[in-house]
Amino acid sequence: MSSAMLNAVDTFGEHFVDASELLGRYEATEQEAADTVRLLGLGPSDTVVEAGCGPGRFAQALASHGCRVIGVDISPQVVALARQRHPGPDYRVLDMADLPPGCADALVNVYSSFGYSATPEEDAEVLRAWWSALRPGGRLLLELSDLERAKARLGEEGGTVHRETNGVREELRMDWQQQMLHVTYRIGDRRLDCRTRIYSRGQLVEGLRAAGFTEVDCFGGFDGREKTPEDRLVLVARR
Ligand SMILES: C[S@@+](CC[C@H](N)C(=O)[O-])C[C@H]1O[C@@H](n2cnc3c(N)ncnc32)[C@H](O)[C@@H]1O
């Protein structure tokens, strides 16, 4: 089952990666990967799939811990970027809803790489595909911005939030009824628009359980700390 998408297929290419770098979003990559290895108990015999791997920075950091990493992304442009910038892991152009059954001991999906299907039902299909991609006993780590964090950062009144950091101008607008975040990034005269469906912690836990996962734990970081409203949400689930 391939999912229809909220954004054009190559939305998260070079411009998005440049903006993320300038915004400092990749600075904790090495630490987050080390924490992921601990949190999921990954070892050298484990095959880890990163679903929505983008430029491969997290896949390569995980691979430096000795596990076999396969980075999967729907965008041919993004996969070309990953092969060029972070060689080491295997990379495949593939919809994360089409992962082969039983292909992984662990699956990671980080930096808000979930919530991009055309409908919530198709997002739920993605969770089911992840469950079946894992071998029995396999672990999932999902790290993303949740509804609680969106409320803490953007306020519930509506309206657009403008920010400028290191030459990147961001415009963020949340449609609370649709649970849809619209973000525009501008660097000089380059502009990128993207949409992400934002879920609450409860909706995600329920979705993971409905997909078949057991033992779903929630944290406020890769280090396993308790979540505050401003923290991104880290979910760890077991098949
Ligand atoms: C916000 S970016 C994050 C990239 C990467 N996880 C990182 O941490 O740098 C989201 C990525 O998910 C990918 N993506 C979105 N929907 C996908 C799908 N259905 N299957 C595979 N990749 C997808 C996008 O192409 C993009 O590279």
Image (cartoon, rainbow, N blue to C red):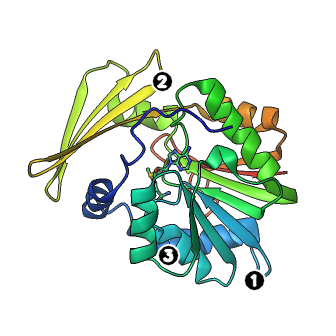
Tell me the element at label 1.
loop
Against 111, residue 222 (above or below) is below
Which mark, residue 30? 3
Tell me the element at label 2.
loop
Asked if residue 106 lies left or right of residue 174, the reply is right
Asked if residue 238 lies left or right of residue 188, the reply is right
Give the mark, 2 or 3, whose residue is nearer the N terminus. Answer: 3
Do callouts 2 and 3 mark residues in contact (Cβ within 8 Å)? no
Which mark, residue 44? 1
What is the distance, in whole Å, between disc 2 and disc 3 at their CAs? 31 Å
Spot occupied by residue 210 in the image (x, y as percentages of width and height)? 80, 32
Q: Nearer the viewer, residue 218 or 55?
A: 55
Point out the frontmost of discs 1 and 2. Answer: 1
Residue marked by disc 2:
179
Q: Looking at the figure, which quarter contains the N terminus?
A: top right
Give the mark, 3 or 1, whose residue is nearer the N terminus. Answer: 3
What is the distance, in whole Å, between disc 3 and disc 1 at their CAs? 17 Å
> Badge 1: few (under 14), some or many (20 or more) residues near its Cα, within 10 Å?
few
Label 3 is placed on what type of residue?
A: Glu
Residue 124 in view here:
yes
